[in-house]
């Protein structure tokens, strides 16, 4: 029997080692089959029967607070949390002790007592966990610091020991603060949707908790209010600011039949909305859930750092032990002096800055992207964007608006009502070109479909359709489809018309009966305003190749490519052909991204190194199938995300290089006796602070 997964919020998670220890403790609880702590999002997933009291006991070593995911966690400010208060008190005792130590006389009883109190108050949790880890052969940061503190006390350096405790606590507090700042992007998304909605009950509007609203209820949204749940407008007209979902601040007009999303802002009109999704199924809820999962996924750079730290810490302990024993044993060195240097080496080699450098950058980048209307499914995809060499674009709905319109109707024979016959047939198709023809027929006012008997409808994917209207058979489709089914050969004047329209970037639908060509319908899908600018930006970013994939005739595709400033074209493709094109691009050695709508090109999106779907706010399919979903139909987000990816990777590399450089320099200074123990821990805290601030800079990266 499958055990239901339960999810919880965690408050007070200070470091990755604490995360691993908490996960281990939860797994050992009776009734728990599996547990997973997501440090990046401060979430816990549990398979099994467990209470919040049991979970908090499992996290008591780090004063963790736990609440159910569907409950709002009462957040205590970091500076008021128990660990922070102990750190401040430890620091105060250290300062007073130093004042007595320097001002009165060295080695005074009172200063030693104050240093001891500082160590106990600030470090008892660290000491207990560190000793457990040492005996359990888990040589993490807490184990390193515990050894350093015990060693400092053993050689009589009480002030140094107190300094190690205080500054290590500061380092942990900085880690907690930085991850809390990085997670704020998700908490801001959570707060976008109101907790209540005005629902019609018995003819009256009643304020109701969104948890109690069911699909089908009618919701009132007043000017200046946020939409509480996803739904469809059934009455009224207004403009809605959809920036929380799409990242686009320009308001969109919403009228009867249009969809609205929870968390968006109603600017001026009163609208009534029929609820279509429960609270947990809304678009904003799905975005939050997917972003949290994405932030929990480790990027390759983060996985490398974690593997490095796993072996790094035991090696450091061995080196420190060597530093302590070799000089006194072989070179008649002072035991006190070399124990001191070995302890300083342990402290400065602590991998705090190294470990925090990657997750804070990844979490900040993914959260910032989400606030700007881009959903990245994980750090691995964010990282993959930085190394792209090729981008393949599906034409319709990506480079173009996806709303084709009939521009020309050319008759080759005097046939009465042939265009309307075509429109009647096209009602049976869901193809965008078919919809354009039907719309054009409706606009002409000649739309009495009840007079016609349509039968024997057959659709040939990617080619055309055939059907019988009032016992007359029609073939409607591309040139090759008509050539294969019509007896009449092309005349020069017919070819001239078709070629001219194709050179203008228009898609030509040819109409024939069994004997002769009847006419042609030209349809054009307007290019998005942002497409040409975005392609230019991608070229500036150094993308080697950009390819447009389309089922259009090669002349039509060439006309569109020319308007886009020149882009490689793969034309006359069937849906399955797009998959083969992407495979071939990968075989040629490129790192390929595919940009599409996430529906009919889902196989190509899945095959590419990175699949990017447009219009994720409107389709669940795009959210589920793509690696990255652009919540608005804005191709300009693609160059923005590549810049974000490259900036994130650059920040991670800077942080790693800086952390290791600081440690190497400090180790050299220790070997020559030039770096005291207290300054070693200050160097470690400083490095943690700097890499944290560098990672948080990603929150300021803007589109442009």
Image: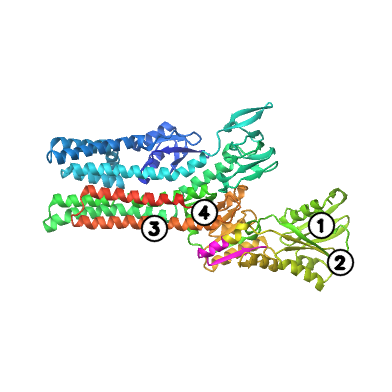
Q: Residues within 10 Å of mark 3 (few under 14, many from 20)?
A: some
Mark 4–mark 3 distance (CA, rounded to whole Å):
22 Å
Mark 4 → mark 2, Cα distance in angstroms: 56 Å
- Mark 1 against mark 2, which lies toward the viewer? 1
Q: In the picture shown, does residue 479 fall above or below 67?
A: below
Checking the image for residue 703, the label placed there is: 4
Q: Which residue is mark 3?
A: 653
Alpha carbons under labels 3 and 2: distance apart: 69 Å
Left or right? Give the position of 378 relative to 258.
left
Front of the two marks 4 and 2: 4
**Closer to the observer: label 3 or label 2?**
3
**Around disc 2, counting alpha carbons within 10 Å, would you say few (fewer than 14), some (14 to 19), or many (20 or more)?**
few
Q: Residues within 10 Å of mark 4 (few under 14, many from 20)?
A: some
| Residue 486 location (% of width, % of height) | 82, 67
Q: Which mark is residue 422?
A: 1
Question: Where does the magenta region start and end?
Answer: 534-550
Residue 687 lies left or right of residue 503; in this view the side is: left
State which tag comes first along the sequence, 1 or 2.
Answer: 1
Q: Residues within 10 Å of mark 1 (few under 14, many from 20)?
A: many
Q: Is residue 657 magenta?
A: no
* Residue 564, picture quadrant: bottom right
How far apart are the alpha carbons under marks 4 and 1?
Answer: 45 Å
Residue that protrudes farthest toward the bottom in the picture? 492
Q: Which residue is mark 2?
A: 515
32, 306: nearer the viewer: 306
| In the displayed structure image, the side of residue 160 where residue 367 appears, left or right | right
* Mark with earlier residue (4, 2): 2
């Amino acid at each position: 029997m499958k055990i239901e997964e339960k999810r919880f919020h965690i408050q007070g998670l200070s470091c990755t080692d604490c995360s691993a220890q908490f996960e281990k403790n939860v797994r050992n609880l009776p009734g728990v089959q599996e547990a997973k702590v997501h440090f990046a999002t401060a979430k816990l997933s549990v398979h099994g029967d467990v209470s919040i009291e049991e979970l908090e006991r499992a996290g008591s070593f780090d004063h963790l607070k736990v609440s159910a995911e569907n409950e709002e966690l009462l957040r205590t400010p970091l500076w008021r949390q128990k660990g922070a208060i102990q750190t401040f008190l430890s620091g105060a005792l250290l300062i007073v002790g130093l004042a007595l130590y320097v001002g009165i006389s060295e080695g005074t009883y009172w200063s030693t007592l104050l240093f001891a109190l500082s160590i106990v108050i600030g470090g008892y949790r660290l000491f207990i966990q560190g000793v457990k880890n040492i005996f359990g052969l888990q040589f993490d940061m807490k184990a390193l610091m515990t050894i350093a503190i015990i060693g400092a006390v053993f050689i009589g350096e009480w002030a140094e020991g107190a300094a190690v405790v205080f500054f290590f606590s500061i380092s942990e507090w900085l880690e907690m603060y930085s991850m809390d700042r990085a997670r704020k992007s998700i908490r801001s998304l959570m707060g976008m949707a109101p907790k209540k909605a005005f629902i019609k009950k018995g003819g009256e509007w009643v304020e109701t908790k969104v948890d109690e609203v069911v699909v089908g209820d009618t919701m009132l949204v007043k000017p200046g209010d946020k939409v509480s749940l996803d739904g469809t407008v059934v009455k009224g007209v207004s403009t809605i600011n959809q920036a929380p979902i799409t990242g686009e601040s320009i308001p969109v007009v919403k009228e009867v039949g249009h969809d609205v999303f929870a968390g968006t802002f109603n600017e001026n009109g009163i609208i009534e909305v029929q609820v279509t999704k429960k609270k947990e199924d809304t678009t904003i809820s799905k975005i939050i859930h997917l972003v949290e999962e994405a932030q929990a996924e480790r990027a390759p750079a983060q996985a490398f750092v974690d593997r490095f730290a796993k072996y790094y810490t035991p090696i450091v302990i061995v080196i420190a032990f060597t530093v302590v024993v070799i000089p006194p044993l072989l070179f008649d060195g002072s035991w006190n002096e070399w124990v001191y240097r070995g302890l300083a080496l342990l402290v400065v080699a602590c991998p705090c800055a190294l470990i925090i450098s990657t997750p804070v950058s990844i979490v900040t980048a993914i959260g910032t992207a989400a606030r700007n209307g881009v959903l990245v499914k994980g750090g691995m995809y964010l990282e993959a964007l930085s190394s792209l060499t090729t981008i393949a674009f599906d034409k319709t709905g990506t480079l173009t608006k996806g709303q084709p319109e009939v521009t020309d109707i050319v008759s080759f024979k005097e046939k009465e009502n042939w265009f309307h016959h075509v429109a009647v047939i096209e009602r049976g198709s869901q193809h965008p070109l078919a919809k354009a023809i039907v719309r054009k027929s409706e606009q002409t006012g000649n739309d009495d479909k009840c007079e016609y008997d349509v039968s024997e409808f057959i659709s040939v994917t990617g080619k055309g359709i055939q059907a019988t209207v009032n016992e007359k058979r029609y073939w409607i489709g591309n040139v090759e489809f008509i050539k294969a089914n019509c007896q009449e050969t092309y005349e020069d004047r017919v070819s001239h018309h078709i070629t001219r329209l194709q050179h203008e970037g228009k898609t030509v639908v040819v109409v024939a009966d069994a004997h002769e060509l009847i006419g042609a319908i030209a349809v054009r899908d307007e290019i998005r305003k942002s497409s040409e600018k975005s392609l230019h930006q991608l070229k500036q970013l150094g993308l080697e190749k950009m390819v447009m994939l389309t089922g259009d005739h090669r002349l039509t595709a060439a006309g569109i490519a020319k308007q886009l400033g020149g882009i490689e074209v793969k034309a006359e493709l069937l849906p399955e052909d797009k998959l083969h094109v992407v495979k071939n691009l990968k075989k040629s050695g490129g790192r390929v991204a595919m940009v599409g709508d996430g529906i009919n090109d889902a196989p190509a999106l899945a095959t590419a190194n990175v699949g990017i779907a447009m219009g994720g706010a409107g389709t669940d399919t795009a959210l589920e199938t793509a690696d990255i979903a652009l919540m608005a139909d804005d191709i300009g987000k693609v160059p923005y995300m590549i810049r974000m990816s490259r900036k994130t990777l650059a920040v991670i590399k800077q942080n790693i290089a800086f952390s290791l450089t600081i440690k190497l320099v400090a180790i050299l200074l220790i070997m020559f006796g030039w770096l005291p123990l207290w300054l070693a821990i200050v160097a470690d805290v400083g490095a943690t602070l700097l890499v944290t601030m560098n990672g948080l800079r990603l929150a300021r990266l803007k589109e442009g």
